[in-house]
Image: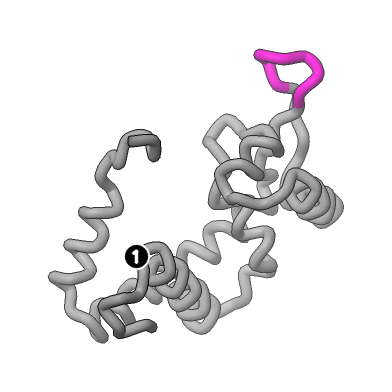
Amino acid sequence: MASASRTSLSSMLVDAQRWLAAAERANSGRSSGLARSHSLVFSHLDPEGTRPAEIARRAGISRQAVGQTVAQMKNLGLVKLAPDPTNRRARLVQPTAKGRKALERTGTGSAAAEKVLSRRIGAARVKSLREALEQDWGSPAS
């Protein structure tokens, strides 16, 4: 992780996310079977499902990349495409039972990674970090 105070917050958050992802993989016990791109899609799904274009917007990646990843995930049985009740032409990406099981295994790794982080930087700092990230930050526009 970066230690220079001149490092941007954005860069530090990206570094932190990479560390957490690696710690989750290292501490998940059994493999979740999820590629990093699959985890990225899952992390942007709403409970009722999400349009691929919205996943792309949230993740900051192209619609084409999301489309390819969703197609892979569909072939693996991790997600399904369901009709969007608000727009007949649109589809919602939703996890399947197999996808939810893979997410549960990832969650085990997440909890273990958080424990490792608590041992490394202290439980109070992890608690403060979690509280800051749980806040409603509002719109990015000033």
The quarter of the displayed image where residue 101 is located: bottom right
99 left or right of 2 in image: right
Tag 1: amino acid: Leu
Asked if residue 88 lies in the magenta stretch, the reply is yes
In what quadrant of the picture does the C terminus appear? top left
Q: Secondary structure at mark 1?
A: helix
From what the image shows, is residue 139 above or below residue 30?
above
78 left or right of 140 in image: right
Tell me the residue at 68%/61% (across/down). 37
138 left or right of 127 in image: right
* Residue 22 on image: x %, y %: 51, 79
From what the image shows, is residue 131 above or below residue 10?
above
Front one among 130 and 64: 64
* Residue 73 on image: x %, y %: 77, 53
Tell me the residue at 69%/67% (across/down). 35
Kindly identify which residue carries mark 1. Answer: 9
* Residue 64 on image: x %, y %: 80, 48
Q: Residues within 10 Å of mark 1 (few under 14, many from 20)?
A: few
Task: Give the dominant element type of the magenta stretch: helix, strand or loop.
Answer: strand
From what the image shows, is residue 81 above or below residue 40?
above
* Residue 106 on image: x %, y %: 53, 65
* Magenta extent: 84-90
